[in-house]
Amino acid sequence: MADLANALEARQIGTLRYNFPYMESGSKRPDPPALCHATVRAAVEEARKQAPNIKLIAGGKSFGGRMTSQAQAAKPLPDVRGLAFVGFPLHPAKKPSTERATHLAEVKIPMLFLQGTRDDLADLTLLEPIVQRLGPSVTMKRIDGADHSFHALARSGRKDHEVMEELAGMIADWVDAL
């Protein structure tokens, strides 16, 4: 996430990075959703305090993005104009399902999904129809050859920093269009 934050900074887009409590304590077991949602809300509030006059987008990588979308679905995040997901975890690896996406219909602001075509946590044949049903304010961008961590195969000729630049460009274009 640091590499993506740096690539966004180069495009004049600030980021606020944070950890969930379980990550801070070194646990591998995620916190209960209610605590994660409260953490997301606290981070959004801090971002509002730090930069009160800018367009606020929330989101995150994998679990962080899913917790952000759940928080938004439960009760809109104040002043947030869109959600950006960097590798939305639609299902556990090798267990394709769509249950983790049911709450997305309750999100009433624009959403951006950035998904690697080799992502084991998001079968694109399942995610793409969901995104289409969510309506025209929801966008999905495929990152060819990238996995859930956005590593591209060496034979693709693309380095990780090039993939991060691609992601940052997609996010910047989407934010500009809001």
Image: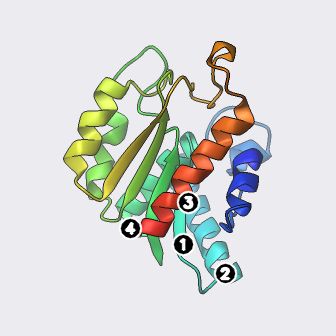
Mark 4 highlights which residue? 75
Residue 31 visible here: no
Circle 3 SS class: helix
Circle 1 SS class: strand
- Image coloring type: rainbow
State the CA–CA distance, disc 2 to disc 1: 9 Å
User: Left or right of 38: which side holds 160?
Assistant: right
Q: Amino acid at mark 4?
A: Lys
Mark 1 highlights which residue? 56
Which residue appears at 61% of the width and 79% of the height?
48
Which residue appears at 24% of the width and 50% of the height?
134
From the image, state whether disc 1 or disc 3 is nearer to you. Answer: 3
Which residue appears at 29% of the width and 59% of the height?
137
Which residue appears at 36% of the width and 59% of the height?
73
Mark 2 highlights which residue? 51
Q: Amino acid at mark 3?
A: Ala
x, y percentage for residue 127? 33, 33
Q: Amino acid at mark 1?
A: Leu
User: Left or right of 135: which side holds 80?
Assistant: right
Q: Nearer the N terminus, badge 1 or badge 4?
A: 1
**Residue found at the very far bottom of the displayed protein:** 53
x, y percentage for residue 130? 26, 39
The quadrant holding residue 45 is bottom right
